[in-house]
Image (cartoon, rainbow, N blue to C red):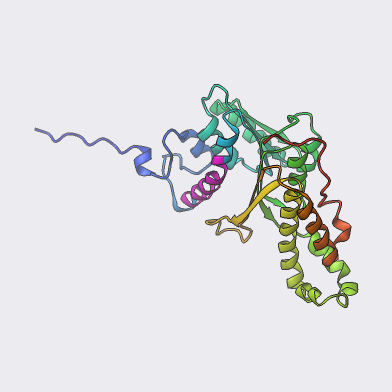
Amino acid sequence: MKPAKKEAPTIYQLAPEIKPGQSIELLKELHILTRDGKLNQDSRRKLKQVYHLVQFIEPLLKDVGESATVVDHGAGKSYLGFILYDLFFKGRENGGHIYGIETREELVQKSTELAARLGFPGMSFLNLSVAESTESDKLPATIDVVTALHACNTATDDAIDFALKKHAKHIVLVPCCQAEVASVLRKNKGKDLGRSALTEIWRHPIHTREFGSQITNVLRCLQLEAHGYQVTVTELVGWEHSMKNELIVATYKNLPRRRPAERLQQVLAEVGLGELSSRFYTEPTTSEPTT
């Protein structure tokens, strides 16, 4: 009697990192899985990174509900958007909508074609800058969740401006390459050096760059708090390929605004960044999102 033939292991057994029900075709299209369904070390790390982000965003989506609207700025190949849609919105009757904002037209086209091929009707991709998207009539007047992951330099500030004007309930940011503040510190360095001993913090060029990056995120957090948001800052672990791994999560709670607004102005004045007060504005928006 011949021994019973062993059944071939399923793809979920071969790659236990993959969550039940995930689209195998999607993971292949995103080059996380090879064409024969294998998961190599590089793609395993990439998947781990996306899942790590998803664990921060999942409770925010649950808070908003199944019909959540999400805007992902600087979407790139839309790894995050596609996996979020696959895990949380796919097949739901009142499924939400994910908008990917990207300046590279070829990536927008590819993502649009992939969403159509996978049958993901609740995904749209727009060839816009972050600043342009704020005024675009192709997006709803209000957005529930705004993400901006490694949006370079002032694009993160534009994403904050977008979120405030769209009355976002939740904001998820991984800032990158903050150069604007450092350039202002550098420009004013000569006249500021004798003003306060604190200017020694950014006297040397490398310190100007690093302090500029640090103070930029401090100002962003104060700005969000000055608009009533509760802000959490943590490290996005597992992103070994990038030194920029600071994660800022903000949730609108209608908190008191005066103290963070005052502190923001004091910090700008103390470090000689008063000319940037219009970027880190604290004026309340015309209406506030509901809690």
Name the residue rendered at 71%, 34% in the picture: 126
Which quadrant: the C terminus? top right
Task: State whether residue 186 is above or below residue 236.
Answer: below
Q: Position of residue 17 (x, y in %)?
A: 42, 45
Q: Is residue 129 visible?
A: no
Image spot of residue 32 (x, y percent): 49, 44
Q: Is residue 290 left or right of residue 134?
A: left
How far from the left and from the top, in percent, is residue 55? 52, 45
The residue shown at (46%, 35%) is 22
- Specify whether 237 is left or right of 284: left
Image spot of residue 102 (x, y percent): 70, 40
Q: Nearer the viewer, residue 245 or 152?
A: 245
22 vs 211, nearest the viewer:
211
Q: How many marks?
A: 0
The magenta segment: 44-59
Q: Is residue 167 located in the magenta-colored stretch of the structure?
A: no
The answer to whether one can see residue 50 in this image is yes
Q: Is residue 258 above or below residue 27?
A: below
Q: Residue at x 81, y 43 (%)?
A: 284
> What secondary structure prevails in the magenta region?
helix
**Residue sitting at the far right:** 191
Residue with the most extreme top position? 93
Quadrant occupied by the N terminus: top left
Q: As rendered, which of 285 and 187 lies closer to the eye?
A: 285
